Image (cartoon, helix red, strand yellow):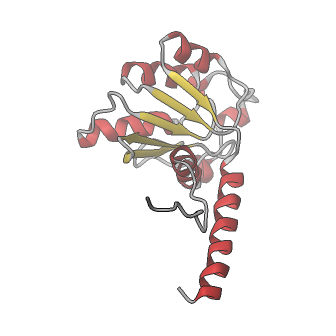
């Protein structure tokens, strides 16, 4: 029997890996108020990503300003006034455009889905939603749970995950350099 060695570095879990990826996707957001990113995964394979921003070929809020800010609309309310498409919506739309089935997939998102996004997630037959980061609007989560979709809220935020991964990599580099691997 082979003796099992202790790993020389820790790897992020699958959920941590895709959560960190959703955080990176959020950096493409063109929303003035909030950066959201999402990743849709099927069998541990990324099939789509999305971030919140203006519809294709339309001016971005970064360029023309935010109507919701101008009207002093509180966060989490009156989503229909916003010109932006949400991260979850963009990811689902990209699957439709490129012929990728979302049935049974997992969606990773950097904040709570709103009620509109929750309805799209339910109808797209996504089985599981992994959330990193809170948001004022919890109605979407309640709707997802009512529909039987597994909702998991990450204990660690994406920046915490990335810090853990970076430290593990640095520790591994030191060991590698000492052993001249």
Query: Is residue 90 at least partly visible in the picture?
Result: yes
Is residue 162 depicted above or below 167 in this figure?
above
Going by the picture, which residue comes out furthest to the top?
146
Q: Quadrant of the N terminus?
A: bottom left
**Where is residue 140 drawn, in percent x and y?**
59, 20
Is residue 28 depicted above or below 126 in this figure?
below
> In the rendered picture of this protein, how many numbered marks are placed on residues?
0
Q: Measuring 53% from the left and 10% from the top, which residue is drawn there?
A: 146
Q: Measuring 54% from the left and 35% from the top, which residue is drawn there?
A: 83
Is residue 107 depicted above or below 140 in this figure?
below
Going by the picture, which residue comes out furthest to the front?
1
Going by the picture, which residue comes out furthest to the left?
99
Q: In terms of depth relative to the viewer, which is nearer, 74 or 10? A: 10
**Where is residue 17 drawn, in percent x and y?**
53, 51
**Where is residue 72 drawn, in percent x and y?**
76, 30
Query: Is residue 84 at least partly visible in the picture?
Result: no
* 4 with respect to 66 (left or right): left
Q: Measuring 32% from the left and 39% from the top, which residue is drawn there?
A: 95
Q: In terms of depth relative to the viewer, which is nearer, 170 or 101? A: 170
| Residue 153: quadrant of the picture | top right
Q: In terms of depth relative to the viewer, which is nearer, 3 or 174? A: 3
**Where is residue 49 drawn, in percent x and y?**
43, 46
* 136 with respect to 3 (left or right): right
* 180 with respect to 72 (left or right): left
* 28 with respect to 58 (left or right): right
């Amino acid at each position: 029997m082979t003796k099992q060695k202790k790993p020389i570095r820790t790897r992020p879990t699958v959920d941590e890996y895709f959560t960190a990826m959703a955080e990176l996707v959020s950096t493409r957001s063109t929303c003035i108020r909030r950066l959201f990113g999402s990743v849709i995964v099927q069998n541990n394979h990324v099939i789509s990503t999305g971030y919140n921003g203006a519809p294709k070929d339309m001016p971005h809020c970064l360029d023309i300003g935010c109507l919701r800010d101008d009207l002093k609309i509180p966060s989490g309310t009156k989503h229909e006034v916003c010109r932006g498409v949400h991260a979850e919506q963009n990811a689902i739309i990209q699957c439709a455009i490129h012929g990728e089935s979302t049935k049974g997939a997992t969606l990773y998102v950097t904040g709570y889905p709103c009620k509109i996004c929750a309805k799209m997630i339910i109808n797209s037959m996504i089985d599981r939603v992994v959330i990193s980061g809170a948001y004022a609007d919890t109605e979407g989560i309640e709707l997802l749970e009512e529909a039987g979709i597994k909702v998991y809220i990450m204990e660690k935020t994406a920046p915490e995950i990335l810090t853990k991964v970076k430290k593990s990599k640095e520790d591994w580099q030191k060991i590698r350099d000492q052993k001249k691997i």
